[in-house]
Amino acid sequence: GFNRMIDMPAGTSGVFGGNFDAELEFLRCHLISGRNNFSLGWGYGWARYRLSSDRCFNFDGANVSIAGYPDGMQPVRSVFRLNRHVFSFNYLHMFDHKVAVTLGAALNVHVRPRIYNTYLRDGHSQRDTYKYNVPYAPIGFSLMGKISYDDFGFFVRYTPTSVFEKDRGPQFKSITVGVTFF
């Protein structure tokens, strides 16, 4: 799906289409009662947050902020990437043998943060990569709704928790819209 960062700091925006989210589910246990289905699942996901071209994720070794690129650098892109283990609880209601609605919540255990700032200096492409000590929030939560027909569905996921630690990085929420296959 494509995600949109909301409640961003003033003067900052993300790139729609440059922000995306992918998730693969490995295990799901079901409790089925008629047309109702309760389930617990585990999966692994990956999210990418890209800022508009004139702003970058600035990491000073302890904190992350959103700022302009330094003088003399021509911006290309600034991306924060974060992987996660997803532990989900879903309720699914089948309307017939093919149409279903799902509502769910997920606990996201974040791992492997990365910041990539790419820019041109004197006409040459350069990239700054930050992998260590990035102050990311280790735990997050999401709420999800999905409408599906047979093996294809559309979903909306709202994540009210920021991916950065409070007081050590920009605080924003995200909403993701996309498709599912199962």
Image (cartoon, helix red, strand yellow):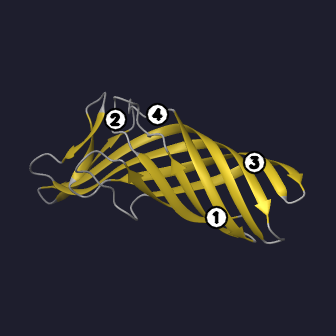
Q: What residue is rendered at 33% in x and 47% in y? A: 8
Within 10 Å of disc 1 (Cα), the crowding (few <14, some 14-19, many 20+) is: some
Q: Amino acid at mark 4?
A: Ala
**Which residue occupies the foreground of this view, 107 or 42?**
107
Q: Amino acid at mark 3?
A: Leu
Viewer-nearest of labels 3 and 4?
4
Q: Amino acid at mark 2?
A: Gly
24 sits left or right of 168 in the view: right
Residue 108, located in which quarter of the rendered image? top right
Task: Mark 3 or mark 4: name the one nearer the start of the chain.
Answer: 3
Which secondary structure lies at badge 4?
A: loop
Viewer-nearest of labels 2 and 3?
2
Q: Are marks 1 and 2 in contact (CB under 8 Å)?
A: no
Task: Mark 2 or mark 3: name the one nearer the start of the chain.
Answer: 3
The C terminus - image quarter = bottom right
In the image, residue 11 above or below residue 2: above
Residue marked by disc 1: 180
Q: Which numbered circle lies on residue 2?
A: none
Residue marked by disc 3: 27
Residue marked by disc 2: 169
Within 10 Å of disc 2 (Cα), the crowding (few <14, some 14-19, many 20+) is: many
